[in-house]
């Protein structure tokens, strides 16, 4: 809350016949009132969502180093749940000491516990960084171990595609000293003007063979 915001609030109160003597207009008071209002809103939204929470759901997470308003940097992980009829639900963005697999798994599981979905999780969605995919200390395997049951892994392959393109361009143009590539920046800026036909897109066809790996893995997470 800034001094300008308090001045605006004071003007609104007095212009509508109110008295500043009957109201607390300090920065700390406004901050506490806003926090209380947010907590009340969150509690109501949470209660509503829990009343219709899905029987099965997928837990998503992704970490990022962010810069706070104060200028201080902080590692946080966004935790989301999908499979609800109302669509995906962001359930928290808690801070972490660092983005190790252990810290990410603990933060994601804590959010799952607070939203009472630990027993409903049948799959996990994550990007393919080592902190998520590690065979012993990756967040995915640690979550599966903590829940004591097999989970369906829905790993994002976006980073794999990036690496293939990076290797191809390195072979063609040599090592680069900048994180972006001008040709891709132009492609990104012009993408909305491309004439793309999406009519031939098809959905994933579930295999008829019930002995296939997909069938076996899907069955294992539902039992």
Image (cartoon, helix red, strand yellow):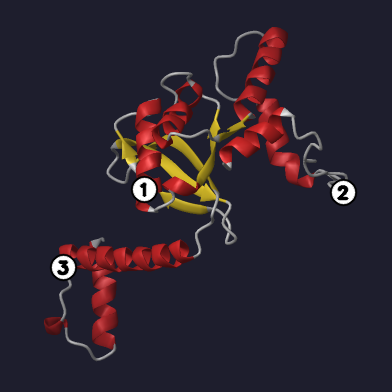
- Where does the C terminus fall, quadrant-wise? top right
Pointer 2: what residue? 199
- Kindly identify the residue that appears in the image at 58 percent across and 57 percent down: 87
> For the residue carrying disc 2, how many other residues have a C-alpha within 10 Å: few (<14), some (14-19), or many (20+)?
few
Quick check: marks 2 and 1 in contact, CB under 8 Å? no
- Where does the N terminus fall, quadrant-wise? bottom left
- Please tell me whether mark 1 or mark 3 is closer to you in this view: 1
Pointer 2 or 1: first along the chain = 1
Above or below residue 217? Residue 86 is below
Pointer 1: what residue? 113
- Please tell me whether mark 2 or mark 3 is closer to you in this view: 2
> For the residue carrying disc 1, how many other residues have a C-alpha within 10 Å: few (<14), some (14-19), or many (20+)?
few
- Kindly identify the residue that appears in the image at 42 percent across and 46 percent down: 118
Image location (x, y in percent) of residue 91? 43, 52
Quarter of the rendering containing residue 7? bottom left
Choose between 111 and 92: the one closer to the eye: 111
Residue 208 visible in the snapshot: yes
Helix, strand or loop at mark 1: helix
Image location (x, y in percent) of residue 127? 55, 31
Pointer 2 or 3: first along the chain = 3
């Amino acid at each position: 809350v800034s001094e300008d915001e308090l001045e605006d609030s004071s003007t609104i109160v007095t212009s509508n016949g109110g008295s500043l003597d009957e109201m607390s207009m300090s920065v700390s008071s406004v901050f506490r009132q806003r926090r209380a209002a947010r907590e009340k809103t969150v509690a109501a939204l949470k209660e509503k969502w829990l009343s219709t929470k899905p029987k099965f759901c997928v837990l998503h997470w992704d970490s990022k180093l962010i810069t706070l308003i104060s200028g201080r940097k902080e590692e946080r992980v966004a935790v989301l749940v999908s499979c609800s009829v109302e669509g995906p639900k962001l359930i928290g963005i808690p801070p972490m000491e660092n983005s190790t697999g252990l810290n990410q798994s603990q933060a994601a599981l804590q959010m799952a516990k607070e939203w009472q979905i630990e027993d409903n999780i049948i799959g996990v969605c994550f990007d393919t960084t080592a902190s998520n995919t590690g065979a012993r200390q990756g967040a995915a395997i640690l979550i599966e171990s903590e829940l004591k049951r097999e989970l369906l892994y829905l790993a994002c392959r976006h980073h794999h595609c990036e690496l293939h393109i990076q290797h191809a361009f390195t072979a063609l143009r040599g090592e680069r000293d900048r994180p972006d590539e001008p040709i891709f920046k132009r492609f990104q800026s012009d993408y909305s003007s491309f004439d793309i036909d999406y009519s031939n897109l098809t959905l994933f066809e579930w295999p008829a063979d019930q002995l296939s790996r997909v069938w076996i893995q899907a069955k294992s997470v539902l039992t």
